[in-house]
């Protein structure tokens, strides 16, 4: 488990006080039941995305999501589920999207690491 700096954890905990979270098991259940009512967004860095990601996810890295989301996903009522490596960066991004007017944003606690640890399908560039 990665050891994060106190200042980073403080802003993550602050963001988590304002957002809704979901978990790997719920997203797995929804995806594998055929639920496509939400958009799954990987907010990790480009190199992380390229090393593997969750099937059906789109990539809007945390560094650009606020800049690009309105163009890519203009419906502010659409359900968006964000994930990162463990659930911290996605919480920060979810908080910002809510501040931008998005009304149905979730952060997936456990993130990609939790997805992989559960033995779930991962897409890699050669697939």
Image: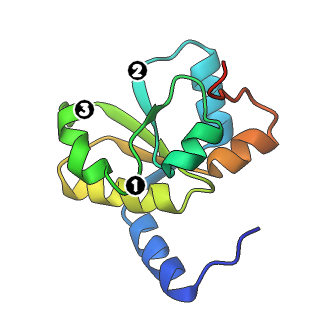
**Considering only vertical position in the picture, is 7 above or below 83?**
below
**Considering only vertical position in the picture, is 57 above or below 113?**
above
Question: CA separation, marks 3 and 1?
Answer: 14 Å
**Secondary element at image label 3:** helix
Viewer-closest of 28 and 17: 28
Q: Which of marks 2 and 3 is nearer the N terminus?
A: 2
- Say which residue label 2 marks: 37
- Say which residue label 3 marks: 72
Viewer-closest of 24 and 124: 124
**Secondary element at image label 2:** loop
Residue 16 x, y percent position in the rendering: 45, 65
**Considering only vertical position in the picture, is 2 above or below 39?**
below
Screen quadrant of the N terminus? bottom right
Is there CB contact under 8 Å for labels 2 and 3? Answer: no
- Say which residue label 1 marks: 62
Question: CA separation, marks 2 and 3?
Answer: 16 Å
Q: Residue at x 35, y 33 (%)?
A: 79
Residue 127 x, y percent position in the rendering: 66, 18
Which mark lies nearer to you, 2 or 3? 3
Q: Can residue 118 be seen in this view?
A: yes
Q: Which residue is drawn at 26% across and 52% down?
A: 66
Q: In this view, does 124 lie to the left or right of 10?
A: right
């Amino acid at each position: 488990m990665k050891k994060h700096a106190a200042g980073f954890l403080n802003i993550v905990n602050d963001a988590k006080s304002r957002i809704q979270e979901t978990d790997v098991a719920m997203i797995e259940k929804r995806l594998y039941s055929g639920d496509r009512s939400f958009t799954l967004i990987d907010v990790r860095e480009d190199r992380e995305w390229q090393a593997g990601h969750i099937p059906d996810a789109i990539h809007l890295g945390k560094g650009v999501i606020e800049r690009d989301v309105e163009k890519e996903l203009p419906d502010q009522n659409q359900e968006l589920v964000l994930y990162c490596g463990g659930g911290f960066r996605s919480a920060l991004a979810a908080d910002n999207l809510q501040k931008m007017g998005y009304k149905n944003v979730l952060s997936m606690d456990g993130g990609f690491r939790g997805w992989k640890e559960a033995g779930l399908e991962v897409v890699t560039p050669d697939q």
